[in-house]
Amino acid sequence: MKNSTTLIRWLLLIALLGAVIAFFALGLQHQLNLEALKSQQQALEVFRQAHPVALALVFFLVYVAVTALSLPAATLLTLAGGALFGLLEGTILISFASSIGATLAFLASRFVFGAAVQRRFGQRLSAINEGVRREGALYLFTLRLVPVFPFFVVNLLMGLTTLPARTFYWVSQLGMLAATVVFVNAGTQLASLHSLSGIVSPRMLGSFVLLGVFPLLARWIVARVKARRVYARWPKPKRFDRNLVVIGGGSAGLVSAYIAAAVRARVTLVEKHRMGGDCLNTGCVPSKALIHAARLAAQAREAGRAGVQVGEVRVDFRAVMARVQQAVATVAPHDSVERYRELGVDVQRGQARIVSPWVVEIDGKPISTRAIVIASGAEPWVPPIAGIDQADYLTSDTLWALRELPPRLLILGGGPIGCELAQAFARLGSAVTQVEAMERLLLREDDEVSAFVQTQLAADGVDVRLGHKAVAIEREGATQVLVCEAGGQQVRLPFDRLLVAVGRKPRTAGFGLEALGIPAARRVETDAYLATLYPNIYACGDVAGPYQFTHTAAHQAWYASVNALFGQFKRFRVDYAVIPAVTFVDPEVARVGLNEREAREQGIAYEITRYGLDDLDRAITEDHAHGFVKVLTAPGKDRILGATIVGQHAGELLAEFVLAMRHGLGMNKILGTIHAYPTWAEANKYAAGNWKKAHAPERVLGWLARYHAWRLK
């Protein structure tokens, strides 16, 4: 049975390919054009009057065949239908013929390729299949109304999904009807076009206006239908208490509320814990204060190399942590309740829960609002390792309660947070072991960057264990031990305190998203405008991703709040084209745009320009002559695709490349900018100079050499 089905598939595929090849081999595509239609118009009209049913049947069958075989003639046949049969009859014939032909193409694609595609790519297509199961009819209806892809492509691709054939037919019948009417109407006017003056006739102009306006109208209809569908079970308030409610007082929430208040909207900001979110209280501010103290300790130990003797360096860890908290307290007023209330924001303390698309409860008290922004942030992810619950582990959230320096600190994770804290605690005096399951640190960076950081961590005393998979945490008397698998063997690593830094997960629980059906399995799902399933509910910052940076959260917040408040007039797609990132190890790692790894994965051609900081005068004078600037440019052009900087003040140096990429400035512009001497920023100019040398106009320089030689005579 299986062999016979396979044989039928092959025979059908050969027949279909044969029909398509014959169509082009016989030159039929040259017969199906507007000129041929005009030349045969009179004869066809005579035949139609004599045999109206026969012509309609032949036309119907030809249209079905052309559509089923995905031949490039459907548009012309639609115009011909309008010319031959008029608006009403032409629309009826073509509407049913196109839907039947599309369904035949759909079924052929499914029969020939569907099973093989699902069998080979089933796991990768699982998300698509689930989406088709839930929203397949709406997806298809949208594609039919707003033809992003050609209709024949939609027919073939939908055949590879699990969409029922019956659903495909009736949605196609309904979805293509409006476009069919527009093109048939245009065909009725083309049939009566005998001179250039006919082009400006009202009906002809109306047909072309419909062709231009239809996609916009269709997009509006789809949006209305989708909105009506998701809002159907929710009663809408007759009036609203607020224009906007923002959930979360971190970077994204604060910026969203600030923008709303700045445009005089009535906005409520809800925060359950501490204003400022993770960045102020447990992330950026305290970690950079800790890194600063650790850097000072390292510099003091190295001061002898510059002839400065400071004696033995002693770290008072309790004082260090007190200074960290002082830094947090100093910054806190910038994000305080008092400041935002002065700005016009109604700040509420409590647990927010969305109970309908227009109602948010704050500790059970309802408040109605036209729009909502979810900015609830993220929290550390703790992997399910056996025994971890009994390990009294630390995370980037709980770390800041430490007042005693751990003699042996084991850090689980080789990402930015793990690397920053591993180096900092090693410099402060802990014996640090860093465990990473993969074969290198900082997986998003290029291999040479990972190797550079690993070498620096090792130089600071960090015992970096790559390729070590954490399996369990056990006790040996009073000692805690992390059991790992590495190279097929078991490795046991003792520790006093464990810091889990393997990543962060969006904070989505407890806000009512499940009851509203807003997808939030890994993060709150949003569209290109940061809207969720409900067009008036937006999400931004770490809870929405895809980047978990404070500056990206603030960037997204502008789009979320503006779209939430003014989306009925104009919405803006969030722009991720130029996103900088800095890992604050010492020396720093900073990047914007593509690196080599990403360019290779995406198949983007590039050229590399490098400049080593060991050549930079300022780096030499400060005894930090290590690191590099690496710039990716388009082949043969000075357009910057991305830049990676490893070295002192890399985060500050990166800003010039961020500015250049954001405003379309190339390497020539950087080279032509005066940089003060001696500064670290000169590294960017010298990198641009290296690019210029590699792209020097050798032929012109040869002529100049001859010219100067002639001048010597």
Image: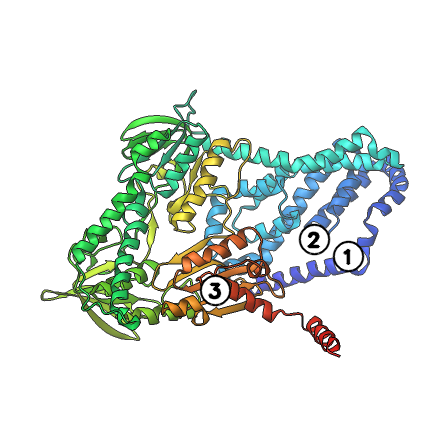
Q: Distance between the Cα atoms at labels 2 and 3?
A: 60 Å
Image quadrant assignment for residue 80: top right
Q: Which mark is residue 374?
A: none
Q: Position of residue 489 (x, y in %)?
A: 26, 75
Q: Position of residue 112 (x, y in %)?
A: 60, 58
Q: Secondary structure at mark 3?
A: helix
Q: Residue at x 44, y 62 (%)?
A: 679
Of residue 448 and residue 682, the one placed in the foreground of this image is 682
Residue at the limit of the structure toward the left, as seen here: 477
Q: Amino acid at mark 2?
A: Leu
Q: Position of residue 427 (x, y in %)?
A: 25, 65
Q: Which mark is residue 683?
A: 3
Q: Distance between the Cα atoms at labels 2 and 1?
A: 10 Å
Of residue 196 and residue 244, the one placed in the foreground of this image is 244
Q: Secondary structure at mark 2?
A: loop
Residue linked to disc 1:
23
Q: Secondary structure at mark 1?
A: helix
**Reading the chain from its start, which is encountered first: label 2 or label 1?**
1
Pick the quarter of the image with the C terminus.
bottom right
- Single out the mark in the foreground, 2 or 3: 3
